[in-house]
Image (cartoon, rainbow, N blue to C red):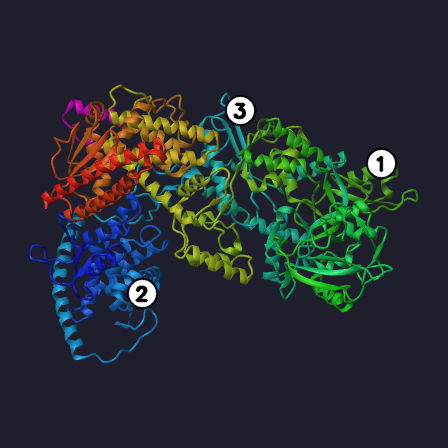
């Protein structure tokens, strides 16, 4: 049995660490509090491991590791084991010295040092941040890391009253969790946390006053203080040494500074080129980098398709790329969803432009009928106490235009800040005269063809807006059962999510039929009860009528297959004027359509006392009336979906209204056929199912909106003053005529009715067109259709439509249908649909949640207070503002850090994976700002390495003198060029960002730049070395030049800044900007070599293994000799070939290639297998903690013995040979052989380390 020697002192955290770890052992050791035998070291804890050859472990970390390993508390796998070791080191070297220096003064041993307490708070806050996303320090269960750190902070938690403890929520939660584990309780008992500097009676509960202390207790405490004082003196000496060592290290290497804000202060007139002569700042700063470039790009005309061309009509062999922006609403500012759209579109535009294509990305803005009218109405009421009706239509529209002229440019400002390379001279607004004329023309042509017609049907009606709204403006609110919801115009919340059952009486009998509804008030408009034709329960009711309880209406029982026999009673009330399904039943059975709601939601066409009630007040009144008549049956919870207007938050009502409709049957078929025939491509293709489902089952489109802001419908109702013509009805299309002017409409009407124009009176429709109607012809109207123009001939049809998949039907489908209808041509050849951006929690962006983020706030940074102020200035209700503030406080407790445009664009593209929504954590964007800084520093270093007199070759080509490092980085560069090209062609933006990120960070910076440092440093005076350095500089320049061009479409600002500092291959006809420089193509950069890549991958595998060993043994500064044992001559030659790279990258003192046996390898090395062909031996003698090494190997040895015993027991069974498959037997035998080999190596390593001790 093992024996554990520990101190009897109750606060000896070293012994406590070993004791708690031992409690997790399956077979805990025997605990001895006496001094260890003289032949053993006197330091405690000490562990004597039983057996014929007793082994001794000393030191708290080594002992605790061995004990915790037996209890499987040292981590799962090599990575977690390494993390546990790091926490052990953190506890021993960081926490314990600070804990002692704070606690001992409180016990009267030494004077209090204020810096020690501050240091303790700093360490605890760092620990608190590590514990924020997790319960334990390593993995999902308690490990030795938790035990060690908990013991290290035990004294402060027992004896120190920390004013900051309330802010250390995660540490406190974690500590209480740990010390309440059974193993801790057995060793420590119930821990009392300090209150006001003294230990209290129960953890975090309150102060318990104990009985007076006895004389024996006081003597014991005095003795304890004496021991503590000695212990403190020792710790102070250790701390002093550590501080001296830290100061030395600080002198050797300055402490890393946080990224700061550097501004561009050189006066540069708008549109003039930025100064690129002054030295680059020390570090990357978005404010410096992004200054002045955009006005210069715009002024130079780089974004215009005419740039570099004599005529647009002149054929370009490279082709044409045209894309129009999805016009954002004029109502406010962009959010991250818009930023994603524009980041992707600008990347594509810049890529096509750099490929030499005639490129146009056309900007525009949508008038956003409902949204804009709501915003301006709220503003008028808030500022002047006026409604739009108080002003009248003309004055109100003037107010909207005034608001648009004041606020509308904010969107364009945001787009410019995002670096969007739009041709601003072609910017359009959907209410501009040119576009308004196109909208009018489209309506008139389609109306004259009969594609647009007048009809009275059910629409989505918002009583608050007094308008029909489109399906996209209806939010589907899911309810699980009874729910009270706020409704505009009602003081109290309204009940939804319940099913009310009541009965109708059969005329001429006592029989009744029970029906159920979620909208009981609509029963006032019922005109029938429907049952299934096959339902045997109701066959006797054929020809019967039902009596309405509140009026003399007699209603038929109709038999219709839409009824579900198995749902409820199998009988359904039918309200044709207020339900979409009931409407269809009403049409099939020629039922009466009784409208019981007016446009404001008040009841009409109903008997007293319900007449004139508001709809949800009527809900209560009808329910009570049914109860009074004895016809009410029950109410029960009912999961349902409630339609809510996204603009007004009102409950949407199906309402019968005469409206204008577009007949979509034939147009939908043409749009579907275009995709089926391959003329139109939708990417990704999983959206095809949705496309065909909509197009093949398309319903006619209601385009009337009862608004004042928008394109007024150019249709006129005709009244004829002639006895031969009877008065017409609103729903009769024969009495409606469309015209470009009232005079034209009058002439058409006179011709239609064969009367003189003097007898015609016209009334223009008050309604405006659905905003999606004008958006549907946006690719046409921006080029002046129906009038001929050069732009229309060159750029229509366009190339690509890129947008979010959520508007595939509402916008994309309608553009396709209307483009085909009006021109006979598709508006574009491809549609790329990106995912929807959600917040880090997967929630949809919503102003009321406080998670709608302005891209400019991510670019420039904003405080939490600034975010709150934006809410205060918004149109949100006070309750929504408070809710949104809480959301902001939760997600951005410190505000949003400055990330810059390039980092935001890169993050958005990196997250854009086809086929799924994007949960974007704003804080992670900051990581790509750090990538920009890495890029910045790499180019600065490289430019210094190139030297002032460096001149690149006129063409990038191999000289034949490249080193293995040069050939490898050029191979990786060529691979990145291929990946970027294929990524852009396939719209694989994560593939592009990954290729560029990996090349710059992991290949160029981490490997190649490190490899070339010794080459460039030893070039002085040696002609061969100088030649090699020259070749290296040419390779380095090629990497910078091509790498920046690859990155430019995604990060335009930082690449322009750095590209302008590089020398040019040819000063003649050199492009003035990276944005109009050619994009790298694989035909030019064709140096990819799988052989070189494979060799370097072998080298990097070895390097990573060496680095891992160095990290395990904390060899951060010390160089060690490395022996690479190879199994064959080929691997040995490879090691020798790359010896310089291996030595440089692994920070080794020297690399020794050893072929075959390990006879040439000296003792005292740590061993790790790099691959099946190479084993790493790292010389550690004199460099490491031998006790820890022995503990790890001893634990490994015990694990192997257990595995072998278990396997041997399995193989020794009598029926093993007969029952176990041969293949499994062979695998077992191989496992046993491998375990025996590993055991032998472990034993040898232990002996080796013992000789070193």
User: Residue tagged by mark 3?
Assistant: 311
Q: Residue at x 55, y 58 (%)?
A: 876
Name the spot of residue 421 as percent of width and height, x first.
48, 36
Q: Position of residue 433 (x, y in %)?
A: 64, 40
Disc 1 residue crowd, few under 14, some 14–19, many 20+, Cα 10 Å: few
Magenta stretch, residue numbers: 1013-1034
Label 2, residues with CA under 10 Å away: few <14, some 14-19, many ≥20: few
Q: In this orientation, does residue 766 appear? A: no
| Of pointers 3 and 1, the one earlier in the residue sequence | 3
Q: Residue at x 48, y 33 (%)?
A: 987
Q: Residue at x 36, y 29 (%)?
A: 1042
| Residue located beneath label 2 in the image | 164
- Secondary element type, mark 1: helix
In percent of width and height, residue 888 lies at 45, 56
Compared with residue 592, is residue 225 higher up or lower down, i.e. above or below? Answer: below
Disc marking residue 461: none
Comparing 1127 with 282, the one in front is: 1127
Considering every residue shown, the one lying at the far top of the view is 960
Q: CA distance from mark 2 to mark 3?
A: 71 Å
Prevailing secondary structure of the magenta residues: helix
Q: Choose between 868 and 485: the one closer to the eye.
A: 485
Q: Is residue 284 above or below residue 202?
A: above
Q: Please name the residue that numbered disc 1 is placed on.
A: 751
SS for callout 3: loop
In this rendering, which labeled residue sits more in front, label 2 or label 3?
Answer: 2
User: Residue 1236 in magenta?
Assistant: no
Is residue 622 in view? yes
Label 1 vs label 2, nearer the camera = 2
| Apparent side of residue 1061 relative to residue 30 in the rendered image (left or right) | right
């Amino acid at each position: 049995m093992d024996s554990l020697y520990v101190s009897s002192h109750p606060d000896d955290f070293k012994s406590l660490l070993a004791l708690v770890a031992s409690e997790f052992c399956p077979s805990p050791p025997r605990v001895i509090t006496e001094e260890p035998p003289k032949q053993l070291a006197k330091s405690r804890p000490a562990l004597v491991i039983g057996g014929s050859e007793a082994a001794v472990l000393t030191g708290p970390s080594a002992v605790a590791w061995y004990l915790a390993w037996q209890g499987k508390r040292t981590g799962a796998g090599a990575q977690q084991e390494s993390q546990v070791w790091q926490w052990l080191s953190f506890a021993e070297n960081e926490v314990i010295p600070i804990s002692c220096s704070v606690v001992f003064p409180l016990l009267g041993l030494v004077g209090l040092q204020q810096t020690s307490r501050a240091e303790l708070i700093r360490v605890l806050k760092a620990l608190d941040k590590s514990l924020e996303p997790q319960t334990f320090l390593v993995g999902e269960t308690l490990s030795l890391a938790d035990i060690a750190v908990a013991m290290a902070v035990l004294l402060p938690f027992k004896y120190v009253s920390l004013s900051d403890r309330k802010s250390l929520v995660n540490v406190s939660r974690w500590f209480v969790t740990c010390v309440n584990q059974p193993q801790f309780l057995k060793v420590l008992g119930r821990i009392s946390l300090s209150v006001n500097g003294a230990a209290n009676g129960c953890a975090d509960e309150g102060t318990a006053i104990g009985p007076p202390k006895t004389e024996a207790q006081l003597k014991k405490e005095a003795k304890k203080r004496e021991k503590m004082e000695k212990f403190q003196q020792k710790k102070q000496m250790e701390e002093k040494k550590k501080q001296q060592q830290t100061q030395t290290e600080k002198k050797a290497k300055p402490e890393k500074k946080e990224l700061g804000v550097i501004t561009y202060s050189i006066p540069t007139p708008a549109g003039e080129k930025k100064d690129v002569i002054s030295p680059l700042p020390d570090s990357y700063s978005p404010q410096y980098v992004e200054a002045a470039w955009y006005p210069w790009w715009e002024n130079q005309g780089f974004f215009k398709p005419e740039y570099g061309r004599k005529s647009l009509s002149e054929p370009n062999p490279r082709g044409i790329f045209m894309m129009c922006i999805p016009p954002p609403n004029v109502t406010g500012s962009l959010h991250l969803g818009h930023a994603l759209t524009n980041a992707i579109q600008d990347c594509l535009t810049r890529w096509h432009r750099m490929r030499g294509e005639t490129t146009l990305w056309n900007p525009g803005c949508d008038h956003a009928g409902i949204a804009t009218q709501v915003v301006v109405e709220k503003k008028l009421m808030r500022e002047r106490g006026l409604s739009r009706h108080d002003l009248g239509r003309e004055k109100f529209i003037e107010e909207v235009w005034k608001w648009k002229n004041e606020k509308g440019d904010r969107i364009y400002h945001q787009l410019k800040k995002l670096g969007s390379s739009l041709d601003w001279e072609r910017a359009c607004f959907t209410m501009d005269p040119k576009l308004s004329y196109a909208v009018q023309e489209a309506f008139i042509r389609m109306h004259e063809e009969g594609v647009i017609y007048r009809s009275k049907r059910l629409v989505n009606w918002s009583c608050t807006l007094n308008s029909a709204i489109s399906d996209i403006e209806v939010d589907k609110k899911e309810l699980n059962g009874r729910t009270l919801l706020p409704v505009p115009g009602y003081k109290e919340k309204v009940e939804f999510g319940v099913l009310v059952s009541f009965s109708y009486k059969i005329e001429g009998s006592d029989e009744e039929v029970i029906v159920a509804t979620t909208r009981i008030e609509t029963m006032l408009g019922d005109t029938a009860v429907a049952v299934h034709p096959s339902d045997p329960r109701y066959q006797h009711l054929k020809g019967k009528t039902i009596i309405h309880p509140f009026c003399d209406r007699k209603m038929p029982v109709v038999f219709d297959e839409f009824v579900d026999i198995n749902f409820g009673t199998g009988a359904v009330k039918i309200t044709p004027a207020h339900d979409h399904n009931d409407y269809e039943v009403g049409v099939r059975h020629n039922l009466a359509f009784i409208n019981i709601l007016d446009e404001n939601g008040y009841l009409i066409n109903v008997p007293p006392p319900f007449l004139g009630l508001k709809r949800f007040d009527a809900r209560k009144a009808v329910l009570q009336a049914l109860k009074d008549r004895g016809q009410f049956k029950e109410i029960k919870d009912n999961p349902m979906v409630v339609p809510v207007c996204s603009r007004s938050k009102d409950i949407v009502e199906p309402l019968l209204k005469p409206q204008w409709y577009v007949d979509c049957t034939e147009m939908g078929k043409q749009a579907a056929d275009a995709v089926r025939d391959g003329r139109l491509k939708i990417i990704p293709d999983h959206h095809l199912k949705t496309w065909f489902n909509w197009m093949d089952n398309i319903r006619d489109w209601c385009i009337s909106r009862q608004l004042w802001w928008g394109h007024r419908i150019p249709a006129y109702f005709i009244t004829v003053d002639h006895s031969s013509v009877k008065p017409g009805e609103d729903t009769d299309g024969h009495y409606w005529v469309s015209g470009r002017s009232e005079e034209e409409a009058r002439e058409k009407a006179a011709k239609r009715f064969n009367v003189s124009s003097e007898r015609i009176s016209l009334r223009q429709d008050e309604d405006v067109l659905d905003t999606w109607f004008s958006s549907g012809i946006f690719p046409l109207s921006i080029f002046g259709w129906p009038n001929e123009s050069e732009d229309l001939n060159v750029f229509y049809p366009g190339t690509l439509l890129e947008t979010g998949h959520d508007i595939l039907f509402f916008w994309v489908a309608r553009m396709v249908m209307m483009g085909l209808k009006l021109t006979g041509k598709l508006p574009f050849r491809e549609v790329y649909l990106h995912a929807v951006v959600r917040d880090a929690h997967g929630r949809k962006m919503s102003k009321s949640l406080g998670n709608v983020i302005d891209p400019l706030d991510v670019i420039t940074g904003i405080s939490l207070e600034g975010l709150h102020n934006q809410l205060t200035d918004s149109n949100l209700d006070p309750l929504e503002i408070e809710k949104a503030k809480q959301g902001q406080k939760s997600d951005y407790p410190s505000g949003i850090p400055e990330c810059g445009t390039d980092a935001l664009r890169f993050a958005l593209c990196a997250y854009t994976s086809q086929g799924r929504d994007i949960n974007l954590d704003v804080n992670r964007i900051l990581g790509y700002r750090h990538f920009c800084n890495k890029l910045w520093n790499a180019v600065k270093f490289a430019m210094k390495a190139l030297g002032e007199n460096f001149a690149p070759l006129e063409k990038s080509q191999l000289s034949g003198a490249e080193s293995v490092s040069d050939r490898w980085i050029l191979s990786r560069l060529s691979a990145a060029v291929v990946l970027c090209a294929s990524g852009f062609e396939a719209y694989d933006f994560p593939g592009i960002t990954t290729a560029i990120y990996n090349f710059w960070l992991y290949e160029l910076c981490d490997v190649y730049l490190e490899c070339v440092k010794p080459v460039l440093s030893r070039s002085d005076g040696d002609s061969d070395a100088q030649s090699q350095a020259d070749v290296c500089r040419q390779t380095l320049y090629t990497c910078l030049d091509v790498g920046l061009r690859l990155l430019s479409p995604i990060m335009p600002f930082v690449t322009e800044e750095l590209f302008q500092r590089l020398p040019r291959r040819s000063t003649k006809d050199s492009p003035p900007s990276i944005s109009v420089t050619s994009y790298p193509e694989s035909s030019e950069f064709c140096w990819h070599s799988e052989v070189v890549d494979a060799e370097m991958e072998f080298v990097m595998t070895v390097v990573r293994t060496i680095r891992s060993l160095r990290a395990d043994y904390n060899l951060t500064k010390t160089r060690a000799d490395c022996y690479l044992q190879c199994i064959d001559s080929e691997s040995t030659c490879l090691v020798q070939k790359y010896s310089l790279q291996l030595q440089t990258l692994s920070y080794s003192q020297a690399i020794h290639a050893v072929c075959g046996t390990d006879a040439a390898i000296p003792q005292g090395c740590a061993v790790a297998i790099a691959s099946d062909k190479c084993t790493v031996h790292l010389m550690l003698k004199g460099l490491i903690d031998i006790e820890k090494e022995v503990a790890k190997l001893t634990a490994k040895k015990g694990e192997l013995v257990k595995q072998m015993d278990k396997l041997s027991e399995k193989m020794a069974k009598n029926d093993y040979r007969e029952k176990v498959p041969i293949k499994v037997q062979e695998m077992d035998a191989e496992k046993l052989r491998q375990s025996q080999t590993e055991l032998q190596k472990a034993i040898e390593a232990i002996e080796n380390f013992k000789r070193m001790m």
